[in-house]
Image: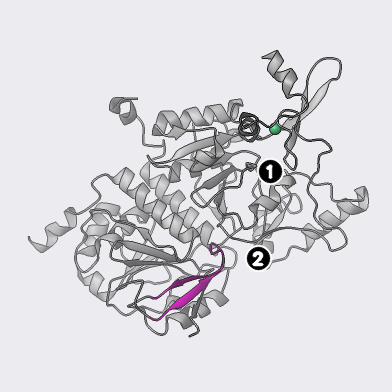
Amino acid sequence: MTTADLATYNFAYLDEQTKRMIRRAILKAIAIPGYQVPFASREMPMPYGWGTGGVQVTAAILGPKDVLKVIDQGADDTTNAVSIRAFFQKVANVAVTTKTRAATIIQTRHRIPEEKLTSGQTLVYQVPIPEPLRFLEPRETETRKMHALEEYGLMHVKLYEDIARNGHIATTYAYPVKVEGRYVMDPSPTPKFDNPKMHMSEALQLFGAGREKRIYAVPPYTEVVSLDFEDHPFEIQTFDKPCALCGAQDVYLDEVVLDDRGGRMFVCSDTDHCEQRCASGHRGHLAHDKEAAE
Amino acid sequence: MPHDTLAFTGGFREPVFEAQSVFRTLMDCMARPGTVGSAAVAVAPPAPLCAAVGAVALTLCDNDTPVWLTPALAASALPGWLAFHAGASVTDDRQAARFAFVEKGAMLPDPGLFAQGTQEYPDRSTTLVVEIEAFTGGRPLTLTGPGIRTEEEFAPVGLPDMFVYFRAENRQNFPRGVDLILVAGDAVLCLPRTTVVRVKEA
Ligand SMILES: [Zn+2]
């Protein structure tokens, strides 16, 4: 890209005043972990469902030295991830990667990478519905009050009803957490499998909700506890088999349909993790079939 | 140089990239209290404000953020400089100030007098930006809280003995409270409202 091309955009698309406003919101969000800071969300050249909140946060923090990774579910090659990555290559000329460990900023729609994040990294979540109390109380004035007074009883009631109905807590995505013993927070539509990774993470975690105009944060080394009951403790999903391609256990797996005869396999949702493992010689029970097919 | 032309010089040379670089320092330091970052940017605010505090002001302030200044800063060419380079206006009202600036050697105002935010909107509080002499060589203080694995330590020169008391008061109001950006030379260290500051036991 030439200088002339770059000159037709603001660096990272947003104007400087918008960046300053978002940056101020980010600093406040970090200072009040789990609290949703209102911000004046801007129109972005993509629909709301595409993660405009996360895109605005990334645009406000991104610089020339950054290396950006974008994932949708756990994959770098889905339409949403490819589009957002291409957007930042165009408007910020930023270096991009699919490798978790090479990235300084990782924007995600669902998953937290399997590889442990480190202190030089920032994870930016694209959040559709930031308010964990929204399904219990539609009025913003009321949910504000509930957060202000730490009135989270209703949230526990909802989880309890889950148990009464299903014998266990059925919520598997956007499972509510309490941050540093104070604010109840929605960890975006991440699977609850990833909740433990948020706890005492070395990386900074930033959350942007474009349509709902909220930014919130979890600083590194911060307590993030999934809500539960002593007699019904929080549990993550477990998978019966390891990844069919790389043999990984204790990772989040996606079901993939193999043929029209009902054949299916379970593989890592984190595609980079799977590729790194395969490259270093790990093999699952269907790895050979895949190689033969390619 | 005549006094009033000072206002038009000494801003960012590359506003987009210098502001981004200073912001990332502030973000990293706010996320990791006790960590020292660099805000070395060639800006030249009017004396007695130092370059790094000037860079913080240009990075965060604009016409949406009234700023409070100490008497010495208010009497300097700084109000004109902030208006010209950032579009920010000065206020006497500590409750209205989104940022407050304190130069080296000035008396630290009681953070409790500034906007603390409300219980519903604790983000509507003042951020204090304070220049001090140094982060080492003074009375050792320990830091704990979010962003800190176990414990951090720093030994500021240029903060009053009352500082630890101010911080304890501030912590009691959580989630309300002011956040602090400390500057010494080109170095920056942040203390968000969550950070617990104690005198290090001998
Ligand atoms: Zn795998």
- Residue A67 falls within the magenta-colored stretch: no
A289, above or below A67, in the image:
above
Looking at the picture, how far across and down is residue B168, in whole percent? 52, 79
Q: Which residue in the protein does label 1 denote?
A: A190
Which region shows up in magenta?
Answer: B139-155
Give the residue displayed 46% in from the left and 49% down from the top.
A22
The type of residue carrying mark 2 is Arg
- Of residue B97 and residue A174, the one placed in the foreground of this image is A174
Q: Do the residues labelled 1 and 2 touch (CB within 8 Å)?
A: no
Q: Which residue in the protein does label 2 denote?
A: A182
From the image, which quarter does the N terminus of chain B lie in?
Answer: bottom left
Give the residue displayed 70% in from the left and 52% down from the top.
A196
B152, above or below A277, in the image:
below
Give the residue displayed 31% in from the left and 55% down from the top.
B58
- In the rendered image, which quarter is residue B80 located in? bottom left
Determine whether, in the image, residue B85 is placed left or right of residue B160.
left
Q: Which residue lies furthest to the front in this view?
A: A281
A254, above or below B101, in the image:
above
Looking at the picture, how far across and down is residue A228, in whole percent? 80, 59
